[in-house]
């Protein structure tokens, strides 16, 4: 089993790739908030919510550089 040190951070190029890949998820999160405000929960599926949460996790990883696992 590989021991990971909590003080190690991801390299900057990997963090940049994760951050760029998370942008569409964040745009979906904004669209979900607008849809929630205008139409309520009727037009929002569970997949959209999970995809938006994955985007927030990706941005967290990109900003802090910490691994979640």
Image: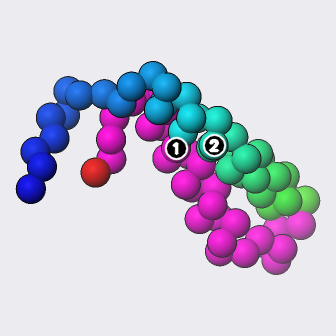
* Residue labelled with disc 1: 58
Q: Is residue 27 magenta?
A: no
Q: Which mark is residue 33?
A: none
Q: Nearer the viewer, residue 62 or 12?
A: 12
User: For mark 2, does the 10 Å Cα neighbourhood hold few (<14), some (14 to 19), or many (20 or more) residues?
Assistant: some
Give the colouring mode of the picture.
rainbow
- Whether 10 is drawn above or below 50: the answer is above
Say whether disc 1 or disc 2 marks the residue closer to the N-terminus: 2
Disc 2 target residue: 21
Residue 4 position in % (x across, y down):
16, 41
Return the x and y of residue 24 as percentages of the image width and height: 73, 47
**Residue 48 part of the magenta segment:** yes
Does residue 26 appear left or right of residue 66 in this picture? right
Q: Is residue 33 left or right of residue 5?
A: right
Pick whichever, 22 or 43, lies toward us: 22
How far is mark 1 from mark 2, CA to CA? 8 Å
- Magenta part of the chain: 39-68
Q: Quadrant of the N terminus?
A: bottom left
Q: Is residue 15 left or right of residue 34?
A: left
Asked if the residue under mark 2 is in contact with the one under mark 1, i.e. CB atoms within 8 Å, the reply is yes
Instruction: State the residue at coordinates (69%, 40%).
Output: 23
Residue appearing at x 31%, y 28% in the figure: 9
Counting from the top left corner in percent of width and height, residue 50 is at: 59, 65
- With 64 as the anchor, is 31 left or right in this view? right
Regarding residue 33, the answer to whether it shows in the image is no
Corner quadrant of residue 35: bottom right
Q: Quadrant of residue 67?
A: top left
């Amino acid at each position: 089993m590989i021991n990971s040190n909590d003080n190690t951070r991801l390299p900057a190029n990997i963090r940049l790739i994760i951050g760029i890949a998370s942008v569409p998820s964040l745009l979906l999160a904004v669209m979900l908030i607008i849809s929630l405000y205008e139409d309520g929960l009727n037009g929002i599926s569970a997949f959209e919510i999970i995809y938006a949460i994955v985007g927030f996790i990706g941005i967290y990883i990109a900003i802090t550089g910490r691994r979640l696992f």
